[in-house]
Amino acid sequence: MATLNLSNATKSYGDVDVIKGIDLDIADGEFVVFVGPSGCGKSTLLRMIAGLEDITAGELKIDGERCNERAPKDRGIAMVFQSYALYPHKSVYENMAFGLRLAKRPKDEIDAKIREAAGILQMEHLLERRPSQLSGGQRQRVAIGRAIVRNPKVFLFDEPLSNLDAALRVSMRREIARLHGELDATMIYVTHDQVEAMTLADRIVVLDGGVVQQVGRPMELYNRPQNVFVAGFIGSPKMNFFQGEITGTQADSITVTTPATAAVAVPVTSNATPETGRAVTMGIRPEHLSVADDGTAPGFTGTIVLVERLGDESLLEIALSDGTEVIAKVAGGGSEAAGDTIRLTFDPAHLHLFDADGERIG
Amino acid sequence: MTGSTRRAPFRANQAGLSHYALIFAIIAISIVAAFPLVWMVLSSFKTPAESMQVPPVWIPKTPSLEAYSEVSGVINAGRSFTNSAIIATTTTLGILITSLMAGYAFAKYRFRGRNLVFALLISTMFLPPIVTLIPLYRMVNSMGLNASLVGVIVPNLANAFGIFLMRQFIAGVPDDLIDAARVDGASELRIVFSVVAPAVVPAIAALALFAFVFHWNTYLWPLTILQGNTDDYPIVLSLGRLLSYNRGAMNTGLVMAGATLAVLPPLVLFVFLQRFFVDSIVSTGVKG
Ligand SMILES: Nc1ncnc2c1ncn2[C@@H]1O[C@H](COP(=O)(O)OP(=O)(O)OP(=O)(O)O)[C@@H](O)[C@H]1O
Ligand SMILES: [Mg+2]
């Protein structure tokens, strides 16, 4: 258990800056998830924390102590890799024992720790096997067991579940959540899977281009994305965006007009003072669009291009008259069919408004 | 080159004419290749008269071990075998260790000039050994190691081919495995020998065999550097003395007996090591 602080952490390969000055404070026992598109630097940042990658500039502190120069083994971390990275020629038992033996721990202590970890992960019966004799889920369990026996201050996971099939991913995800509760340890978890991020995280760090886009609780990110990037990244299917301009301002709302929608009064809570005429991006999530019946709520009309029925809900892809494509998530199997004209409405309270730079204004 | 390739089992019904032609060719080549070896072994059991007979006698009528007992009378066979064993074993071990370490560095470290250094190293593979014989002799001589086993061994403790082979195989070892070992607290040396080496066992077995056979049979370099110090002669050099000890008389049986003894150790090693490359036991712990 420990705190972890990054200040202005930077990583460059030659002239290429991959991590561009990241500040982050992680509390003791917190579960923090790094998400972002491929190549945004999630793994690099995690490996900088692990000590597998030099920190070009800035500082890393674990439990208040500077760790930039420390070897991975001296940082009090343990890491679980996407590829499991089990030693192929060693038994499960020896895989877990390797680090402890190197640290010259007494034999009975090593044995006790391995039995305990195996108990937590329900894999006592696997201890004598080789990695090649295990299923993917079992291998990942061993990899987690190898991390547990190190008794680390901070657990680091780099996409640990992405090699597993969907069902196993769900059960291992729950297991990791349970483990976090049981071990009460600080955990940092890299993933590109939103569901993992939303369900596991105390806080999510959204990265893009080596820069932190937003840090916050999962529902904070969902409800109040700080910028267009986060708005588009968190949530599935993606948020719909409309380009428009401000056509009026009131005390607690801004009137926005887009080619697709008539003038809509968007409630604003921030103290931004937008002027009329400025370009804005308006966003609405697919699940906040509904098939209209009364005709009074704001909305728009379009032609259904594609219907994807998922059972409990359906995804409608709709083309608007100006060419904009919109996705709506509606309940049930629905009677909608491709080619139908449909009117969709929304509650202005669900709208997100971003300025020309992509920053949130309401 | 990875351990995961599986050969499709041979199926008789797929075998067309070309298949039989192939098998015939393999058998023919094997006979040609094995002929001298078989001739050598058979001759070693012949009496001196039989080995001189025209037309040649194939199978000795009264197989005798006489030639074998005579070998020790002419050369100190025990000493020569020990010398060969020392030279071949130490050199092989040295090559394995240096090749693993350098191969690891070339495969997994990123440093300035890596490719240039590697290219230079590889280029030495194309130098005919004869070209370096004299300079090497002078260097070892000036180090005071001439006429000794140490002098035979030292210049061969590392070689470009071994490093090249190891680099190729180690490049296939997943980086995550190495990083996992680093997190576990393994030193770089420990990683080379406890994590990387077990993952490239087939390559190590192959290199060990090549190196052992080559340095067991090496002739020119020991002859040059030992400067007639026959006490330190490996068996291959001593065989030469068998041939010439009794000028005028042909000692075919004697030489064949000595040669038969000399090929035994590499043969035994081959039988022992071949299972490592026939079925490579490495299974990857990384999902693949
Ligand atoms: N050795 C290197 N030299 C130069 N650039 C590198 C090097 N290693 C990584 N990069 C770059 O750093 C960036 C971040 O890589 P990183 O592996 O951290 O991405 P990631 O967010 O983990 O992506 P993914 O989701 O695909 O795993 C990438 O654009 C990559 O091309
Ligand atoms: Mg990654």
Image (cartoon, rainbow, N blue to C red):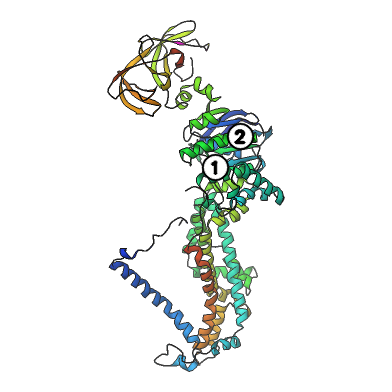
The chain letter under disc 2 is A
Work out whether residue B288 or residue A268 is closer to the camera in this orientation and state it: B288
Q: Say above or below: A157 vs B261.
A: above
Residue indicated by mark 1? A81
Please state the horizontal and vertical placement of residue A188, each as a whole percent of the image. Answer: 58, 34
Is the C-beta of the residue carrying label 2 under 8 Å from the nearest atom of ligand 2?
Answer: no
Question: What secondary structure do most residues of the magenta stretch adopt?
Answer: loop
Q: Percent position (x, y) of residue B7?
A: 41, 60
| In-image side of A341 versus A210 (left or right) | left
Q: What stretch is highlighted in magenta?
A: A266-270
Q: Which of the 4 quarters of the picture holds residue A176?
A: top right
Q: How packed is label 1: few (under 14 Cα within 10 Å), some, or many (20 or more)?
A: many
What residue is shown at x 50% (from left), y 58% (from top)? B164
Q: Nearer the viewer, residue B259 or A253?
A: A253
Which residue is farthest bottom?
B49
In the image, A203 versus B141, the foreground residue is A203
Q: In which quarter of the image is the N terminus of chain B?
A: bottom left
Residues at marks 2 and 1, CA–CA distance in whole angstroms: 17 Å
**Neighbourhood count class around disc 2 (C-alpha, 10 Å): few under 14, some 14–19, many 20 upward:** some
- Image-quadrant location for residue A5: top right
- Give the percent coordinates (x, y) of residue A173: 53, 36
Q: Residue at x 59, y 75 (%)?
A: B84
For marks 2 and 1 on the same chain, the one whose residue lies earlier in the sequence: 1
Element type at marker 2?
helix
Q: Which of the chains bears the disc numbered 1?
A: A
> Residue A146, percent across and down?
61, 45
Q: Which of A201 and A4 is in front in this view?
A: A201
| Depicted B88 relative to depicted B258: above or below | above
Q: Residue B102 in magenta?
A: no
Q: Helix, strand, or loop for circle 1?
A: loop
The residue that disc 2 covers is A180
